[in-house]
Image (cartoon, helix red, strand yellow):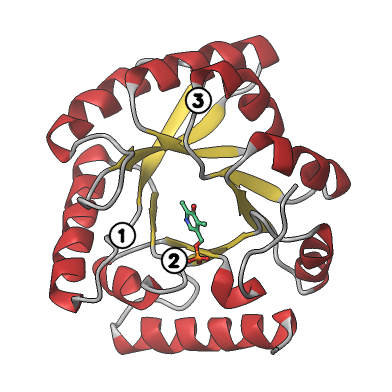
Amino acid sequence: MPSIASRYAELKRDLAAELCACGRAPGSVRIVAVTKRQPIDALREAVVLGIEEIGESYLQEARPKLRAFPKLRAHFIGHLQTNKASGIAAAFDVIQSVDRLEAGLALAKAAQALGKRLPVLLQVNISPSERFGVRPEEAVELAEALRALPSLELDGVMAIGPLTEDPDARARSFERAAALFGQVGGSTLSLGMSGDWRQAVRAGSTLIRIGTALFGPRSYRA
Ligand SMILES: *Cc1c(COP(=O)(O)O)cnc(C)c1O
């Protein structure tokens, strides 16, 4: 199996080439390394390679990892359960998956209690194969409600691409996410994973979330 180092080098090279091919500035897309269900050794290697931002989906699993590597910028990318909001607000630096007001309110309360202003993204649903995310037609209203909460800093949009091999259907979904990002505002469009990041970059993504393409298949269970 290729090493994480060689996969990371290849990803960076391919990303630079893709940005160049679509006329975007070099360095305009950040890579968040998705370490969920990867062992702590994978994080150790990522840190050695200079990776500074990671994504995790489960609070319980993330806690010991984040304790071991407190300097990493940690993005919560999993489904946000309100009963876990205070733990998530305490452990993570960015919450990418705010998809309903209830979750935003729970996070805002937790952030306020911690005395921090928490960067968040609005998760929008652009795919029939995806369970979570606010419906596109409700996104702007939810964004306004979140902006009214002083302990949250709404900085853009996150979306999960459709489970399809059809590049046209995927492009339409991604264009929808990009249009919603334009309406919501902020600086971050979190779009693209191992299997679809090139198309996401072409659609305007500013942050890609990469797990398998960096670390190989997920197997570890916390
Ligand atoms: C697991 C996960 C990823 C990473 O997926 P890969 O296909 O392994 O790159 C990205 N985003 C979210 C929201 C995830 O849950």
Tell me if 137 is positioned left or right of 139 in this view: left
Residue 13 vertical position relative to residue 114 in the rendered view, above or below? below
Q: Position of residue 144 (x, y in %)?
A: 26, 23
- Circles 3 and 1: CB atoms closer than 8 Å: no
Whether tag 2 and tag 1 are in contact, CB under 8 A, the answer is: yes
Looking at this rendering, what residue extends furthest in the right direction? 68
Helix, strand or loop for disc 1: loop
* Position of residue 59 measured from the top left corner of the image (x, y, whole percent): 66, 35
Res 161 label: 1
Q: Residue at x 26, y 25 (%)?
A: 142
- Disc 2 residue lies near ligand 1 with CB under 8 A: yes
Q: Give me the C-alpha separation between circle 2 and circle 1.
A: 8 Å
Whichever of labels 2 and 3 marks the residue nearer the N terminus, that label is 3
* Circle on res. 193: 2
Q: Residues within 10 Å of mark 1 (few under 14, many from 20)?
A: many
Q: Where is the N terminus found, in terms of image quarters?
A: bottom right
What is the crowding at mark 3: few (fewer than 14 residues within 10 Å), some, or many (at least 20)? Answer: few
Q: In the image, which disc is placed on residue 81?
A: 3
Q: Picture quarter containing residue 138?
A: top left
Could you tell me the amino acid type at mark 1? Gly
Residue at left 62%, top 40%? 58
Image coords of residue 29 (percent x, y): 46, 67
**Residue drawn at (52%, 20%) of the image:** 107
Amino acid type assigned to the residue bearing label 2 in the image = Met
Three-letter residue code for mark 3: Gln
